Image (cartoon, grey):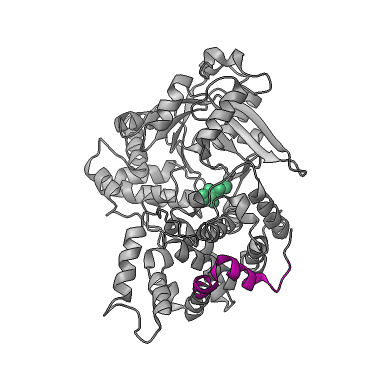
Amino acid sequence: MQRLAPQHLHALSVDVGRPAYDRTALQAGIVHLGIGAFVRGHLAAVNEDAIEATGDMRFGIVGVSLRSADTRDALKPQAGLYALALRDATPDGHARELVRVIGNLLRVMVAPEHPEAVVERIAHEHTRIVSLTITEKGYCHDPASRVLLFEHPDIAHDLANAGRPRSAIGLLVRGLECRRLQGRGPLTSMSLDNLASNGDLLCGLVLEFAARVNADLAGWIASGCTFPNSMVDRIVPRTTAHDIDTLSNRLGLVDAWPVVAEPALEWAVEDRFAADRPRWDMGGAQFVESARAFERVKLRVVNASHSALAYLAASAGVRTVDRAMAIPFMRSYLQRMVDEEIAPVMGPVRGVDLGAFSARTLQRFDNPALAHQTHQIAMDGSQKVPQRLLDSIRERLAQSLPVPMLALAVAGWLRYLEGVDERGQKYEVNDPLAAAMAQHQTQAEGSGGLVSRALDAPHRRVLAALSFTPVFGNLAQSQAFVEAVHLQASSLRNIGVLGTLAAVCGAGTETR
Ligand code: CS2
């Protein structure tokens, strides 16, 4: 089979969509930091629709990998072309797949190879938008207080080595500095990560870093550049070797790195752009005045449910989200967590029926065609738990409301951090704070540690974990919270995940 490439597009299977515009006329108006599967299945798909609908050729994407050369190596022979397969099943269980080749990713740069080229690209006259999907930990911030970690090795490195930044924040600030020195206009930096007020967070971190470089630069950024908040939603699992084989067969051409996603897509982005922007509304995005309500619903319903499911299911040894949904009482547990504990403190969201939204979310998790790995979602919990679970918990505690379901999700995370599932299978806990948490745990539990000797050992263990402030802030001071997590952690230890779900939900009825 030939390789997917512009000169071979005519050989694509007829039922595969392809760019309907002249790719050679496309300018690079967007620099995207963190060119992983998510952005190729989300922003690039919406951008493709916008280009096709308007013929505006100013917004092709230059992707940037912040670490490995894998994506560049896979996509370079394909001139950036790749297939996006949207997969689900019909109500009677038949697999459904819609495949199109996406054309607006023009090329991929590898930042560690040529960081200065990335800086120049950000400063380029055609660049209007820098977008980011660098995952929560890529922001090098403290998850609880949301301030930049100046002691983070990448941030410390980037402040000391102006010409060779390696963090996204460093690359962005140096790019903006270069733009300013070259007399170019300000631009829009747009975070597409699952963080509360992602644009405000990015703005704060950029300004903190820029102020250390030069106060005038920070002033220039603050006065002209914009950082719209956004809510992005589409489930895009990691591509597998099997996906590469099946999709290459489907295309009739070899695609070394296609993307597989669900059909559902949401994107609400604040309409605050420093220079022009594409008509992403032609591809399903909404331009809104404030993304806050959208992002709260997304983080606290979709992502909170995803994380709760992932910790519990992975701890039980269940590997994919659709199989996890088949665990007895998992569905009613997630539904009740949202309906009884999360929704009441979220307040009404205009245009969103929360009950219907959470039911639809759980149907998305049923999708049997994605094989989304529970361990993939369970990684980086220290960066995800605060905005997905703890914000709701805090708001409930402030009103003296109980948190049994949310506490089970937190206990599930602590259980997951043990690194061995109920079937005895060991796994690696992938989390930037795993070592710091383990060290804190030992110190807090040890002699002279924070935790009272009067408590029994399991209780001490939970209190020690919850007193890790980079994740939990001061939540360990809430006795109600510590008790609730302790209760669920004991249950997980004594009767396991399935037993605990049944105990928590047994009184209700399984909704399906
Ligand atoms: C998931 C998200 O990996 C994870 O943590 O919860 O990536 C999720 O699939 C997306 O946010 C859905 O929009």
Main SS type for the magenta part? helix
Rendered location of residue 497, percent (x, y) = 56, 66
Tell whether 469 sits left or right of 151: right
Rendered location of residue 395, percent (x, y) = 55, 70
Rendered location of residue 169, percent (x, y) = 36, 44
Residue range in magenta is 489-509
Q: How many labels does the image show?
A: 0
**Picture layout, residue 376 above or below residue 335:** above
Q: Which residue is drawn at 32% across and 46% down?
A: 210
Q: Is residue 194 visible?
A: no
Rendered location of residue 251, percent (x, y) = 60, 22
Q: Residue at x 37, y 38 (%)?
A: 66
**Picture layout, residue 384 above or below residue 238:** below
Pick out the residue farthest to the right.
92
Q: In which quadrant will I find the C terminus?
A: bottom right
Q: Residue at x 29, y 77 (%)?
A: 449
Give the camera-side residue of 12 and 382.
Answer: 12
Q: Is residue 61 visible?
A: yes
501 in the magenta segment: yes
Tell whether 92 sits left or right of 104: right
Q: Residue at x 43, y 41 (%)?
A: 224
Pick out the residue farthest to the bottom.
454
**Picture layout, residue 98 above or below residue 76:** below
The quadrant in which residue 469 appears is bottom left
Pick out the residue farthest to the left.
160
The quadrant in which residue 296 appears is bottom right
Give the camera-side residue of 122 and 47.
Answer: 47
